[in-house]
Amino acid sequence: MHPETHLALHRVRALDLRAEADAYRLAAAAGPHRLLRARLGWTLVGLGLRLVTTAPRTPALVR
C-alpha cells in the first residue's frame, strides 16, 4: 500500500474513533439511564438482525 494512502486511512480512522469517544462521553454525561437505554436498544437491534439474517433450518422439499 502506498504510504500516503495508508496515512490518509489512518487519519480517517482516528477521526472516527475520536467522534465515537465524544459520543460516548456525551452519553455518559447525560446519565446512566440514557447509557443503559442506548446499550439495551443496540442490543435489541443486534438480536433482531441476527434473527432476520438466520438461514431457515428446515430443508427444502425435493421432488
Image: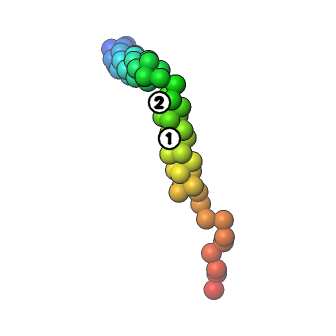
Q: Please state, as top left, top right, bottom left or bottom right, where the N terminus lies in the image.
A: top left
Rendering coords of residue 34 (x, y %): 47, 30
- Going 64% across and 81% down the picture, which residue do you hit? 62
Of circles 1 and 2, which is in front? 2
Residue 40, above or below 24: below
Label 2, secondary structure: give it.
Answer: helix
Type of amino acid under label 2: Arg
Image vertical order of residue 40 relative to residue 54, above or below = above
Of the pair 22 and 8, the residue shown nearer to us: 22
Q: Earlier in the sequence, mark 1 or mark 2?
A: 2
Counting from the top left corner in percent of width and height, residue 59 is at 66, 71
* Quadrant assignment, res 13: top left
Closer to the camera, 63 or 36? 36
Q: Is residue 35 above or below residue 55?
A: above
Q: Residue at x 36, y 18 (%)?
A: 15
Mark 1: amino acid:
Gly
Horizontal and vertical percent for residue 56? 61, 65
Question: Which element carries disc 1, helix, strand or loop?
Answer: helix
Tell me what residue is drawn at x 52 percent, y 50 percent.
Answer: 49
Quick check: 43 left or right of 6? right
The quadrant the C terminus occupies is: bottom right
Query: Callout 1: few (<14), some (14-19), or many (20+) C-alpha neighbours within 10 Å?
Result: few
On screen, 32 above or below 11? below
Distance CA(mark 1)–CA(mark 2): 10 Å
Residue under label 1: 41
**In the image, 42: left or right of 56?**
left
Q: Is residue 46 left or right of residue 29?
A: right
Residue 34's label in the rendered image is 2
Q: Nearer the viewer, residue 11 or 5?
A: 11
User: Mark on residue 49?
Assistant: none
Say how the picture is coloured. Answer: rainbow
